[in-house]
Image (tube, grey):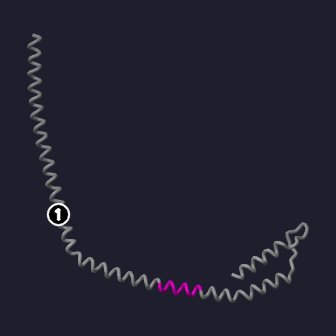
Amino acid sequence: MKVLELLTELEELVEKGNTLPFSSKALVSPEEIMEIIDEIRGELPKELSEAREIVKEKKKILVQAESDAERIRGEAEKKLKEMIDTNEITRTATAQAEQIMQNAQNVAKEIRIGTQHYSDKILYNLQVQLKELNDKIEANRKELKG
């Protein structure tokens, strides 16, 4: 990047120039500035052609990458279709497994409901027995007081 170096040199030349009193203007040597500008002109075509080559190469790389991506996408789609076709057995097994799970959940629900009814019946019978026992205790206490 010779041009950037020359521009930096030009910038330094302006910064080092003597300033006029009470002014922001600098005194620089026109010969030195013209010499650097000529060097920049000499370097520009070379660097511009290099930049064009880089852009051209970038375009080639992008076209190749797009082509490769399209090829890979096509291969992936083909492989996916093959996997879908060969996995029909897996789909059937999955459907059967889902049906078995649904049946198991239904049976578990029935068992849970049955257990709740049975537990409620036992607790009700216990409650009745406790009430009878409580009534007997209360009657015995009244008898003792009376």
User: Horizontal placement of 91 versus 35: left or right?
Assistant: left
Give the residue drawn at x 16%, y 62%. 100
Give the residues in magenta.
54-64
- Majority secondary structure of magenta residues: helix
Give the residue drawn at x 13%, y 51%. 110
Q: Position of residue 82 (x, y in %)?
A: 27, 80
Residue placed under numbered mark 1 in the picture: 99
Q: Residue furthest top?
A: 146
Q: Quadrant of the N terminus?
A: bottom right
Q: Residue furthest right?
A: 21
User: Horizontal placement of 4 versus 138: left or right?
Assistant: right
Q: Position of residue 76 (x, y in %)?
A: 35, 80
Camera-nearest residue between 64 and 117? 64
Q: Position of residue 113 (x, y in %)?
A: 14, 47
Q: Quadrant of the C terminus?
A: top left
Camera-nearest residue between 5 and 67? 5
Tell me which amino acid carries mark 1: Gln
Q: For mark 1, does the 10 Å Cα neighbourhood hold few (<14), some (14 to 19), or many (20 or more) residues?
A: few
Q: Position of residue 74 (x, y in %)?
A: 36, 83
Q: Quadrant of residue 142?
A: top left
Give the residue drawn at x 23%, y 78%. 86
Q: Quadrant of residue 103?
A: bottom left
Queried whether the magenta region covers residue 82, the answer comes back as no
Task: Count numbered badges in the picture.
Answer: 1
User: Horizontal placement of 58 versus 9: left or right?
Assistant: left
User: Horizontal placement of 31 versus 44: left or right?
Assistant: right
Relative to residue 26, is residue 104 depicted above or below?
above
Give the residue drawn at x 12%, y 11%. 145
Q: Secondary structure at mark 1?
A: helix
Queried whether the magenta region covers residue 60, the answer comes back as yes
